[in-house]
Amino acid sequence: RTAGYLHLKEVFDAEEIARYGAEVDRAMAGSTPGDPFSWWSVDAAGHEVVTRINYLGRFSPLLEELSFDPRLARYARLADPDMRVCDDRLDGPMVFVKHSDVVKGNGDLGWHVDDGIGGHPVMCPLIQCGIQLDHATPENGQLLVLAGSHRYAKHWIGWGKEGDLPVVSFVTEPGDLTVHFGDTMHTTPPPTASGAGRRALYYKFSLPKTFDWVPAGCHYNDA
């Protein structure tokens, strides 16, 4: 509630992470450009690369069932005991995939909040639980948050323009869990090394009011 984020070490063991990673790889292999539930970018070599896949249950019952893992609920409900997992709406279970040298698309997200086009009264407090499948470093692409920013009005800022604001960089290991409010400003800048391929699973949690406003299969952004 103070900083707007948590970094929890070794929440998932190596065997679990290997299983989840294999399921993500299968979902990546089964996704194609033009799929309305995935995001694609173009790298410097002109290749189309998938950078986000929503509603992973389309490919993996295991990743769908993971929505209801008590470890996720335990930490999400530190924000509010009535938090519910958004397994069938707000993009459902999803994976972000970082690639090097992305020149077009949303592979690298600037500073933003998840209710950036409105929807704060409908969606927030929104919790994002991120299961880290790979190492996260500047070289491999990592999550940064602006600590405490969920408690304040915010304006758009560019990379390198943060000044003395409290930017926190997550250096994570496979099996770690990150938790942050959707209206804590966050970003995933480009990896600094070639050959990056960091994957992070995300499961959203929100209050019952969100389920009253946003139907199954939909997102506030659809409006």
Image (tube, rainbow, N blue to C red):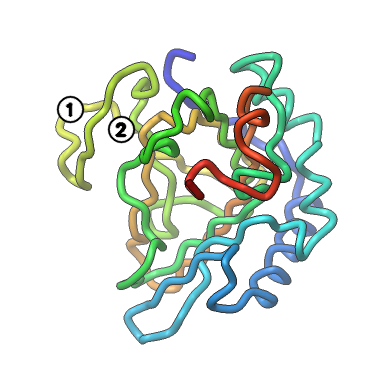
Residue 36 place in picture, x, y as percent? 57, 66
Residue 191 place in picture, x, y as percent? 37, 61
Which residue occupies the foreground of this view, 10 or 97?
Answer: 97
Which residue occupies the foreground of this view, 75 or 56?
Answer: 56
Return the residue found at the far bottom: 46
Left or right: residue 134 compared with residue 162 = right
Residue 149 falls in image quadrant = top left
User: Mark 2 is on which residue type?
Assistant: Val
Number of numbered labels in the structure image? 2
Left or right: residue 18 compared with residue 181 = right
Which residue occupies the foreground of this view, 106 or 1?
Answer: 106
User: Mark 1 is on which residue type?
Assistant: Asp
Label 2 packing within 10 angstroms: few (<14), some (14-19), many (20+): some
Report helix, strand or loop for mark 2: strand
Q: Is residue 132 visible?
A: no
Is the Cβ of the residue at disc 1 closer than 8 Å to that at disc 2?
Answer: no
Residue 167 marker: 2
Q: Is residue 156 visible?
A: yes
Residue 35 falls in image quadrant = bottom right
Residue 164 marker: 1
Residue 190 falls in image quadrant = bottom left
Report helix, strand or loop for mark 1: loop
Q: CA distance from mark 1 to mark 2?
A: 8 Å
Residue 3 place in picture, x, y as percent? 42, 19
Residue at 39% across, 77% down: 42
The answer to whether residue 93 is above or below residue 156 is below
Residue 127 place in picture, x, y as percent? 57, 30
Residue at 80% across, 30% down: 70
Residue at 60% across, 78% down: 32
